[in-house]
């Protein structure tokens, strides 16, 4: 993919084509000395990030959300009851449709929040400790936090191992106890800018799937695990469920 994009951008450079698009804008940004800020290789990396960022994380969060609901049928029944009431008027599944009744969709809102915290697709967050570096240590250091550990902290989450979508709703959530308690999307100025879209995307997926299909586990419940062998944490294969259209 890198080679493919680089070939396109390099060909445009040779042809001196002037197009009013994002590539041309990025190539036109200069440093204070007049040199180009971004080379073709850097821009190719940006485009790859724009194209693929969020795909794996959203699929992992959606998969765990479904698995946790199937492991806890009482919650699945409550989420479905909420969805049936929310879409009883056959409204379109959209941001605008859900916004018509802001009080609805609370359990569904909390459901994907649980797997994104309990089963985070990115298990580690890292930041360069610039301020600490200047005050304490002249060397360059980075500080990291395991999101998979911090989001199971009993000081911040009541009964953290238990599946409970309401944990992230109301006034007693981790965000109220500590500013950076709930960090599956990062925190501070570098928090993922796509987090609201990702959560809306997962809710839209389940607003359709849970109303159209019945699901059941196709293998023992304790055989679903994370696969930490890749950069993004996925589910270890095989990972199967059965589904059939609801009547």
Image (spheres, rainbow, N blue to C red):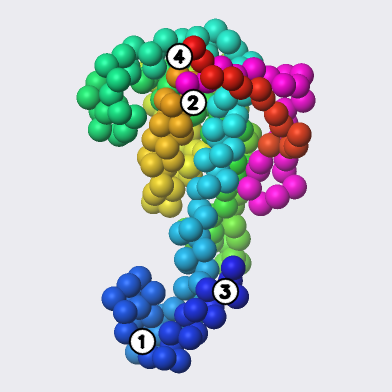
- Crowd rating for badge 2 (residues with CA inside 10 Å; few <14, some 14–19, many 20+): some
| N-terminal-most mark, 2 or 3 | 3
Q: Earlier in the sequence, mark 4 or mark 3?
A: 3
User: What SS does tag 3 mark?
Assistant: helix
Cα–Cα gap, marks 1 and 4: 54 Å
Horizontal side of 206 relative to 86 (left or right) equals right
The image shows a total of numbered marks equal to 4
Q: Nearer the viewer, residue 237 or 130?
A: 237
**Above or below, comparing residue 195 to residue 115 in the picture:** below
Stretch in magenta: 212-234
The reply to whether the C-beta atoms of the residues labelled 2 and 4 are less than 8 Å apart is no
Q: Is residue 186 visible?
A: yes
Q: Mark 2 or mark 4: which comes first in sequence?
A: 4
- SS of the residue under disc 1: loop
Mark closest to the chain's N terminus, 1 or 4: 1
Judge depth for marks 2 and 4 and give the one in front.
2
Disc sitting over residue 17 in the figure? 1
Residue at (66% x, 22% y) in the render: 242
Question: Label 3 crowding class (10 Å Cα cut-off): few <14, some 14-19, many 20+?
Answer: few
Q: Which residue is mark 3?
A: 4
- Say the numbered circle drawn on residue 80: 4
- What residue does disc 2 label? 209
- The image quarter containing residue 60 is top right
Name the residue nearer the viewer: 192 or 199.
Answer: 199
- Return the disc, 1 or 2, that comes first in the chain's sequence: 1
Image coords of residue 1 (percent x, y) = 59, 68
Q: Are marks 3 and 1 in contact (CB under 8 Å)?
A: no
């Amino acid at each position: 993919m890198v080679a493919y994009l680089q070939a396109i951008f390099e060909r445009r450079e040779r042809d001196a084509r002037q197009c009013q698009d994002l590539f041309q804008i990025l190539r036109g940004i200069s440093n204070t000395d007049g040199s180009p800020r971004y080379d073709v290789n850097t821009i190719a990396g940006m485009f790859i990030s724009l194209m693929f960022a969020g795909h794996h994380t959203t699929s992992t969060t959606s998969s765990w959300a479904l698995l946790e609901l199937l492991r806890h049928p009482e919650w699945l029944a409550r989420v479905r009851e909420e969805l049936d009431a929310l879409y009883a008027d056959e409204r379109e599944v959209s941001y605008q449709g859900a916004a018509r009744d802001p009080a609805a969709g609370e359990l569904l809102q909390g459901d994907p929040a649980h797997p994104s915290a309990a089963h985070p697709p990115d298990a580690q967050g890292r930041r360069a400790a610039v301020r600490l570096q200047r005050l304490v240590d002249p060397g360059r250091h980075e500080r990291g936090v395991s999101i998979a550990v911090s989001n199971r902290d009993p000081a911040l989450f009541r009964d953290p191992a238990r599946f409970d979508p309401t944990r992230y709703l109301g006034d007693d959530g981790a965000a109220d106890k500590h500013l950076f308690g709930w960090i599956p999307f990062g925190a501070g100025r570098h928090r993922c800018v796509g987090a609201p879209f990702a959560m809306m995307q997962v809710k839209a997926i389940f607003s359709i799937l849970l109303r159209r299909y019945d699901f059941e586990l196709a293998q023992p419940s304790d055989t679903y695990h994370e696969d930490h062998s890749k950069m993004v944490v996925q589910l270890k294969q095989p990972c199967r469920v059965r589904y059939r259209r609801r009547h």
